[in-house]
Structures are given as C-alpha cells and as structure tokens.
Amino acid sequence: MKLGTKAEVKIQRITSLYHKRDLLLVAIVFLLLPYLLSQESTLSEPLNLRPEVGTRGLGLSGAFISSADDATSPLWNPAGLATLQRGNLIYDLSQGAVSIAYPIKYIGTFGVNFLDLNRSDRFLVEHTTNPIGSFELGNNQALFSYARRFGTFQLGASTGYSRAPYYGSLWAQNYDVGVLTELNPYLAVGMRLRDIAGVTIRHRDGQVLQTFDQQLALGAVLTPHPIIRWHNRLDIIHPCFGTSVEIGNRTIAARLGSMFTFDNGNPSQSWSIGFSLNQLGKQFHYTYLNHDDFKHRHLASIGMSFGGTQPISRSAVSSQQSAISKEAESRKPMANNQYKAAQIAREYDIDVALMLAIIHTESNFNPLAVSINGAAGLMQIMPDAAKDLGLKVPNYKNRRKPKLDRKIDERFDPNKNLHAGLTYFKMLYEKHLNNLTLALGAYNVGPAKVRIRGPLIRRGKRYAKKVINRSQYYRDKPAQMEIDLKRLERILKY
C-alpha cells in the first residue's frame, strides 16, 4: 500500500521521535532540574546523612550513582558490584576505607566495606590493648553487599552497621538498595535508596548520639563519545545536584566536578578535580576537594584486581549466533565432527567457521606468532589476559620478545591458547549481550574501550567485519574450511 506524501512525512517524524525517546526523557529531566533545585527545602533541622566515602566517587562530586563499577560501589550504589568480572580490592588512604568485592559464577557479586579504619580507630574490639588504637574517634561502619545482573538490569542491596565517634556508642543497622541499567549506548541511569528506614545510633544508656536520614538519589551518565562521560546525580529528599565531566578511558582518566546543595534555603557550591590510573590490574585514584566540610582536601586511594575472570555460562547463544551455527552445521561436511578443533568449538558453543576466522585473522594459524604489542599464539593473547585466564606467562621486561617455549610461556601451547582464547571471547560475547560485532571488536581493541552496548571505534569495526566476512567465506566454501580444520588439527597435535 502506497501512502501519500504528507502521510509519509508524518510517519517519518513520529518514527524519528520514537527512536529518540530516551534523549527526550533526559532533556525533560534536565529542563526540570533548575525548577526542582530552586525550591527551598522544607527541612528545619540540619541534615543528618551518613558520611560519603570514596576517592573516586567524591572526585565525581558524588555523581557515582549510575556509573559505580568497582569495590567501592556499595558506598554509592550497591548495584554497581554486578559490573565486576574479577575480584577488586581498594584501600582509601585518606579516609581509612577498605573495600573488597568478588564475583562468584552463576551466583552474583559479594562485597564488604570497612570504613574509618585508621590508626587512631579501634574498629572491631573495644579494648585498650587493641593494636589499631582508640576505638571511639571514628564514624566506624561495616557494610555487606550483594549484586547481580538480570538481563540489562543490575540490582544490588547492602546491609551493615554504623556507630558514632563517642565512648559507649552502640551499633545500629542500616539498609541500602540500588538499580542500574543502560538505556542505550549513550545513556545509563541508576537509583539508590540509602538508609531505607533511617538510622538511630544510641549510647549504652539509651541516649541518641547520631541519626542518619533516608536518602534517595537518581543518577545519569551520558557518553557522547567513547572517552567523554558526563556524570550527574540528583538527591530528591535532601536537595542537591552533582555533576562531573570525565575524559579518558579505563587506563587513564581526568575529571572535574561540582556539587550544589540547597538544604535549609542556604545554597552552597563546592568543586573537585582529580584523575585515575588503571594499569595491569593496579589502580590509583586522586581527588582534590574544595569543600569546607572536609578537613583533608587531598584524597587518594589504591587498588588492585585479583582472581581470574569468572567463567561464563556456555548455554546462552543468541539468535544471531544460533542462526549462523545452524547454517554452518548444515553446510559443513559430517567429517568435521572428527576434528579436535571442531569439538573444542562446540564445547564453547562457538561456530567452527567463526573460530577458524578469528584464528586466521589473529595469527594466520601460526602458533608462534607474536604481535608488535606482545600478543602471542594462535588467538593472540596478551600476557596479563593470559594470566587472568590461568596460563603460565613470565614477567617480561620486553613483552615483544617472549620465550617461544610452551613450557615457559603457555600461550605457545596451541591447545591451551585455543581454550583460553575461546573462553575470553565467550566472556566478551555474553558481556556485550550476545552482540557478535561488539564482542569481536572488544577482543581486538580491548574490553576497556567498548561499553556493553557500544559504540565501537573504527579499528574494532574493521576487525569485526574482517572476521565475519572470513567466517562467511568458510561457510560458502566448505572445502576451504576442511583444509584449515586439517591445518589446525596438525597444529593441535604438535
């Protein structure tokens, strides 16, 4: 049926508006912000809020609600723990906070935070001989958290205990919940409800020493470019607005932020500046706070990742991958089943043609191949990634000149390299919600440069297209796939 010109134009406009609904939602929220923030708070009492801790979060002016993604996430939004693929340990040198988190396969991510653990605080045992020092000088807290991903949503919850910096203070329990989701490649949103029922800390004699009021915060992160992120946070119950611009990637990033508070009708503003380094699983975060409420304005924290990347379920295969697999199975000779490489591919639910295409693109079936960046073997695995995947790799001064001995560097063992490479690719495939192009791009440029829903930089797009074209070539020419399978079989038996 052919429509008239005016009808076609109208439908195009409606369609365009529908596809931009997420951006319209953001625009409406930010148009309302000036009005919301201009309203005077009806609170007549001073705000009683649990102290915010964390160098990175404070450096973002508290706008860590929708981008929390490390062990300190429960301090801002417990749902952020679900992002972790490895264990993470962070110690805040300035605020005495220890944060530990670890993901467990099929179960979720667990986290523990101990706050105000300084030399002048005796955190756990109230006794003068405790080597940590005097117990009553800090706002001690212990927080236990859990988070898990459900489709595109991350959900998390925390419970813990807090005490006041007074002799004889008792512990009081608190509860937090949070949610995170990416609406599209450019926008992620989150919500945190902190101290759900409020917290009242009492002295042994029953006197109220300190209270923490409920807090509800909304967050949004806009990513107009892969290296530019605009973090925002709006507190609803106790009006304040934090915003921060961060430039960089997972390796190095700089940020500048500002916080506006509107409590008791006395608006105030503070700002922060800082940077983060993340190299070889080691992290360093620094922040300078221009805020009168903080005694120490220079904040620093150090961290490290540990443990292997969590194995992924091998049962999930997207419709795109499934269709490719079925087509390949119908076209390839039955004799392929006898090859060890084909059996390994099916073990990881990966199409044989796709596996061969990755190997062809990465190393051209050379088990001793070494790239200019130091990637090695059939699947071209970097030293740190190989260690994370359980392979034995020496600490090279020059990773471009590795030992080509499979007993010293297991990346040159074709069987171990293939298993590790497929495990890594499958992890990226599920991380990117079964998007084959994004998974291939992340395999090439590194997962830190590709968000869950993209976008993908040009080099990654070229690589993904090259691999997909090669896999299609194998499916169109079963005889060539048979030749390369035999070639790979000889390598695996070597």
Image: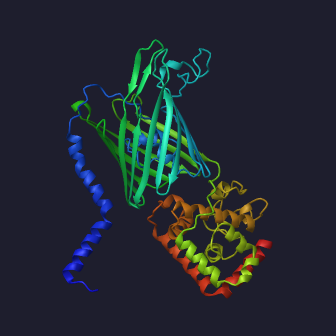
Asked if residue 259 is positioned above or below residue 403 in the image, the reply reads: above
425 with respect to 6 (left or right):
right
Query: Which residue is at the far left?
Result: 6
Q: Can residue 89 be seen in this view?
A: no
Q: How is the image coloured?
A: rainbow
165 above or below 460? Answer: above
Q: Which residue is farthest top?
A: 205
Task: Quadrant for residue 124, please give it.
Answer: top right
Q: Which quadrant, please, contains the N terminus?
A: bottom left
Residue 311: x and y, percent?
A: 64, 56
Q: Looking at the image, is 289 positioned above or below residue 493?
A: above
Tell me if residue 84 comes above or below residue 76 in the rendering. Answer: below
How many labels sit on residues?
0
- 461 or 167, which lies in front? 167
The reply to whether residue 20 is visible in this rendering is yes
Decide which of 304, 48 is in the foreground and name it: 48
Front residue of 427/93: it is 427
Task: Please tell me which residue is depicted at 48% across the width and 20% down the height of the picture.
Answer: 137
On the rendered structure, is 318 left or right of 24?
right
Is residue 402 or residue 57 the one in the foreground? Answer: 57
Quarter-of-image position of residue 415: bottom right
Q: Quarter holding the C terminus? A: bottom right
Residue 471: image location, x then y, percent: 59, 79
* Residue 178: image location, x then y, percent: 44, 44
Residue 238: give x, y in percent of width and height: 30, 35
The answer to whether residue 231 is left or right of residue 268 is right
